[in-house]
Amino acid sequence: MKKRLLILWLFVLPLLVCCDRYNNPIPRVKVDFTIYPNDVMYYRLNTYGGYEYFTGGVNGIVVYRLDEWTFMAYDRACPYDFEEHTSWLCVDEDGLRLVDSLCGSTYNILDGNYLSGPTAWPARRYNCRYDGMRLRVYS
């Protein structure tokens, strides 16, 4: 009986965590823009681990290049204090975390998951589609 409860709990727990993503307090806004990451204008996106900041979303957007074909895009608004206009998620010096400038919450830049701080939600993530030339960031 205990084994069945444990197995059931292992299946239910990820669903509960997953559902919490949808309760993210950052409002959903329309985002849809295209850039050319290989253009010299976006030179930091030419290398793996490179990033650029863009306008849009709730409080700006950061785009991060994970590898040759994979980009991640996050809203720069922290779920904990997104209504404060002096708060931005910024790429940390190590290039692996996003850090909120106001509350100090940190997020994994590879998936947007919460690492530390007062927040309980992941960073708001936007979709990315890259065809080898153009990168479309959209909600």
Image: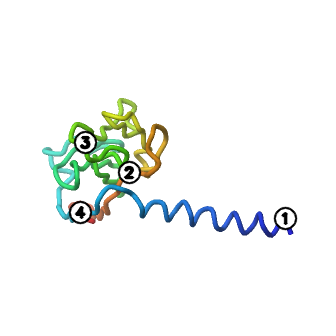
Q: Nearer the viewer, mark 4 or mark 3?
A: 3
Mark 1 or mark 2, which has the lower sequence index? 1
Query: Mark 4 highlights which residue?
Result: 29
**Most foreground residue, 137 or 21:** 21
Circle nearer the N terminus (4, 1) = 1
Residue 102, position as x, y percentages in the image: 31, 34
At 36% from the left and 56% from the top, the residue drawn is 25
- Please state if 69 lies on the left or on the right of 6 as rendered: left
Query: Can you identify the residue that label 2 sits on?
Result: 123
Q: Which of 75 and 19 is in front in this view?
A: 19
- Tag 1: residue type? Lys
Q: Earlier in the sequence, mark 2 or mark 3?
A: 3
Tag 1 near tag 2, CB within 8 Å: no
Query: Picture quarter containing residue 7?
Result: bottom right
Query: Distance from label 4 to label 3 (Cα)?
Result: 17 Å
Judged from this view, the residue extending furthest toward the left is 41
Earlier along the polypeptide chain: callout 4 or callout 2?
A: 4
How far apart marks 4 and 2 lie (CA) works out to 14 Å
